[in-house]
Image: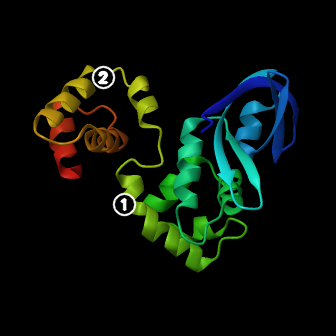
Amino acid sequence: MIEYIKGKLIEITPTDMVIECNGIGYKILISLQTYEASNGKDELIIYIHHYLREDEELYYGFATKDEREMFRLLIGVSGVGAATARMMLSSLSTEEIRNAILSEDINKIKSIKGIGVKSAQRLVLELKDKVVKGEGTDTPALFQKASNPAVEEATTALVMLGFSKPNVNKAVAAVLKEKPSATLEEIIKLGLKHL
């Protein structure tokens, strides 16, 4: 599986780009978020989602891992294909989609071209719990940004209590989203509620 492509930006439009890497030009489908983050750069790293079907093979590219994780979460919903997920990420930022799902803002979601009321309701129904648990985010990036030593201590404490490391990471990520300046005790107490 391809994680990312690092290379020279040859051409870019609001819907796709060509990156040359070791003499090979890769055509990559992108969202407007990625276009805005990449336009004007010579060299860049694009995180890839490899889309493979019997009749086609496509690369979807994202400027951040966070955007790619949201894309993967969206295409996991029945009735939401890759093209619709890309349209959603072009219409709203990753954070706006996350907030719309958490607040059950059906009107905001259905304002996206190609999303009707039923699709918006299905997105909220299927993704709300996952978004609360921290899925669809790049959790390692969240911990790199946090210079809070309490995060590591709380994670270790929760693992020692018998919870699995991936579940603990998701719970701690959810706590930090709700309360970024949480103390060690608060991270552990609130983390236990998410586990």
Identify whether 116 is placed above or below 165: below
Q: CA distance from mark 1 to mark 2?
A: 26 Å
Mark 1 or mark 2, earlier in chain: 1
Q: In the image shown, does 191 or 17 lie closer to the viewer? A: 17
Q: Secondary structure at mark 2?
A: loop
Residue appearing at x 72%, y 60% in the figure: 83
Question: Can residue 84 be seen from the camera position used here?
Answer: yes
Identify whether 128 is placed above or below 191: below
Q: Residue furthest right?
A: 11
Q: Residue furthest front?
A: 54
Q: How is the image coloured?
A: rainbow
Q: Residues within 10 Å of mark 1 (few under 14, many from 20)?
A: few
Q: Is 11 left, or right, of 6 in this rendering?
A: right
Question: Can residue 96 be seen from the camera position used here?
Answer: no
x then y, percent, for residue 84: 68, 63
Check the picture and name the quadrant holding the N terminus.
top right
Q: Residues within 10 Å of mark 2 (few under 14, many from 20)?
A: some
Q: In the image shown, does 70 or 50 lie closer to the viewer? A: 50
Amino acid type of disc 2? Asn
x then y, percent, for residue 31: 73, 47
Identify whether 59 is placed above or below 100: above
Q: Secondary structure at mark 1?
A: helix
Foreground disc of the pair 1, 2: 1
Residue appearing at x 67%, y 58% in the figure: 82
The residue where tag 1 is placed is 129
